[in-house]
């Protein structure tokens, strides 16, 4: 675990050195200014890169950049890379990072703002996102009227990634033993509100 974190830290430092030389001062300043105006971005410059957000994030495994990296990339003006990253879409809005951040940075709101920006400007990497999570999420909720995590996971996991499969099978088993998830999905009647949301989403997708 510690070894993996060290590797991630090394790769991160190497990558950061490279991008610092690639981004201009102006691009950095403009993107930071832009982000400081959106919810969650107000105190982005206070980030001390402690990594608590990344270490706490339950969906880090599915992200291309960690939450901590996204913050640094914003500070470096890497607008396009940030807005086309899978990270902002893999964030499950769980608020763990925000509640633990020593600098009180609302990363959860920031991720939502970044999603909105990416959608508004059509900078959405469909190849990464739709098949991987949102499409699967929509299909599961549309079919069962509620989320069923094992079905969602089966849809989004890369079946050739055995490491992830075993890791998630273990986690799934533990959650099942504690009664947190059921192996088989249980279908419930959709509420009127949910049907409206799903219909609206279908319209936007088509
Ligand atoms: S927990 Fe807060 S201060 Fe630490 S890296 Fe994440 S955003 Fe920055
Ligand atoms: S809110 Fe998003 S980024 Fe923060 S810990 Fe949860 S999933 Fe990760």
Image (cartoon, rainbow, N blue to C red):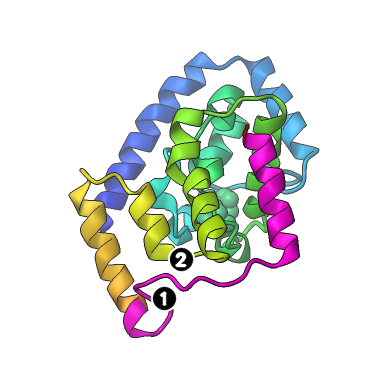
The reply to whether dot 2 and dot 1 touch (C-beta < 8 Å) is yes
Residue at x 39% of width, y 34% of height: 13
**SS for tag 2?**
loop
Comparing 11 with 198, the one in front is 198
Residue at x 44% of width, y 39% of height: 131
Q: In the image, which residues are magenta?
A: 176-205
Q: For the residues marked 2 and 1, what is the alpha-carbon distance in whole angstroms?
A: 8 Å
| Above-or-below relation of 145 to 81 | below
Residue at x 47% of width, y 48% of height: 136
Q: Which residue is mark 2?
A: 148
Magenta region includes residue 201: yes
2 or 1: tag closer to the N-terminus = 2
Q: Residue furthest right?
A: 37
| Above-or-below relation of 161 to 17 | below
Comparing 79 with 19, the one in front is 79
* Residue 107 % position (x, y): 63, 51
């Amino acid at each position: 675990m510690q070894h993996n974190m060290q590797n991630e830290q090394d790769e991160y430092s190497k990558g950061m050195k490279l991008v610092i030389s690639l981004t201009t001062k102006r691009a950095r300043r403009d993107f930071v200014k832009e982000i400081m105006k959106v919810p969650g971005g107000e105190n982005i410059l206070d980030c001390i890169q402690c990594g608590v957000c990344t270490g706490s994030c339950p969906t880090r495994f599915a992200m291309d950049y960690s939450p901590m990296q996204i913050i640094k990339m914003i500070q470096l003006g890497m607008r396009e890379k940030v807005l086309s990253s899978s990270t902002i879409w893999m964030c499950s809005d769980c608020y763990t990072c925000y509640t633990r951040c020593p600098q009180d940075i609302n990363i959860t709101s920031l991720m939502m703002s970044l999603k909105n920006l990416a959608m508004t400007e059509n900078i959405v990497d469909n190849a990464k996102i739709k098949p991987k999570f949102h499409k699967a999420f929509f299909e599961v909720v549309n079919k069962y009227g509620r989320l069923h995590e094992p079905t969602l996971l089966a849809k989004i996991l890369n079946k050739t990634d055995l490491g992830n499969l075993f890791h998630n099978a273990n986690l799934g088993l533990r959650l099942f033993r504690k009664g947190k998830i059921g192996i088989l999905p249980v279908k419930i009647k959709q509420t009127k509100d949910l049907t409206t949301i799903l219909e609206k989403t279908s319209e936007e997708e088509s």
